[in-house]
Image: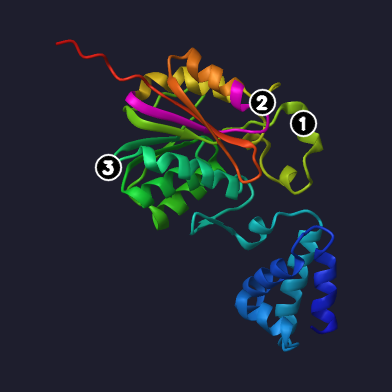
Amino acid sequence: MNQFYRSLEETLSSVSSDPRRELALMAEYAAGIPSDRFLLLCLIDGLPVLSQDQACRLSDLVRRRAQGEPLQYLLGSADFYGRSFSVRPGVLIPRFDTEILVDTALPRLQEGASVLDLCAGSGCIGLTLGAEKNLRVTCVEKYPEAFALLQENAAKIYPSARLVQGDVLTDSVEGTFDMIVSNPPYIPTGDLPSLSIEVRREPSTALDGGEDGLYFYRILASRFVSSLNPGGWMLFECGIDQASSIENILRSVGLCDPVTVRDYGGIPRVVGARKPREVSYV
């Protein structure tokens, strides 16, 4: 690796745990060098000399990354469940932990089932569920920047999804559903200033869950339990130390059989409960 690339990698090391991989992804974006080939060429000291324009683009990406801009915003995309989702400032970046919500939802869904994704953002949850199992998906997102990205992602990943621009705290959604999923804002307001500079670049509206981080869970559970079909599931992603409180919220609106699923770090990450089936009298 020559001095130009080495200096860029060293700059990235201040913000990244894997600076070489990030540099490879940026080189693919800025100079068209496939990232896997870039990593291979690093091993044999065979990286190409870039044109002045390519070098400037790559250097600018590294500079912005070192200043705390998320890599996914710089590249305009994020991988989620084997698919590439468009992302830009104004939308929460899809994360690996959220794939656990998808993993929890899929076995509880039959092909053709109806799913409502609240606070949909990029659409990574609802569109992925739809694409995996041919579902009838409705995604609801309030903010214009995020809704535009939701439309963009739906067009390439699951065009049959119904997209609704609306406020989940005040607006109703037509229909009833076999499952309701959401990754709502859940960071307690007082914790926002202590988040990493990278996370603070994401929209606060997608992070701020109120004083105790549970504001959206209370509202969504109470407002949308009537939209859940008997036997259907309501599933939420959650933060550290929130699972038991969310289970109580779900029970309080009449749901039963609560489940909690831990992430790969052992932290409870997904909480859900089922709506009782209607009693049949013979």
Q: What is the span of residues highlighted in magenta in the rendered image?
A: 229-244
If the image is split into quadrants, where does the N terminus sit? bottom right
Q: Earlier in the sequence, mark 1 or mark 3?
A: 3
Q: Kindly state the secondary structure of the residue where label 3 is placed.
A: loop
Q: Please provide percent x and percent y for residue 49.
A: 74, 88
Asked whether 157 or 166 is in front, the reply is 157
- At label 1, which amino acid type do we have? Asp
For marks 3 and 2, give the CA distance.
Answer: 33 Å
Residue 262: quarter of image: top right
Asked whether 243 or 65 is in front, the reply is 243
Q: Which residue is drawn at 40% across and 29% down?
A: 233
Q: Earlier in the sequence, mark 3 or mark 2?
A: 3
Can you identify the residue that label 2 sits on?
213
The numbered mark at residue 20 is none
Q: Please provide percent x and percent y for residue 271.
A: 53, 30
- At label 2, which amino acid type do we have? Gly
Residue 10: quarter of image: bottom right
**Magenta stretch: includes residue 164:** no
Q: How crowded is mark 1: few (under 14 residues within 10 Å), some or many (20 or more)?
A: few
Q: Kindly state the secondary structure of the residue where label 2 is placed.
A: loop
The numbered mark at residue 112 is 3
Asked whether 54 or 235 is in front, the reply is 235
From this viewpoint, is residue 183 visible? yes
The answer to whether residue 256 is left or right of residue 279 is: right
The answer to whether residue 194 is left or right of residue 175 is: right
Q: How crowded is mark 2: few (under 14 residues within 10 Å), some or many (20 or more)?
A: many
Can you identify the residue that label 1 sits on?
191
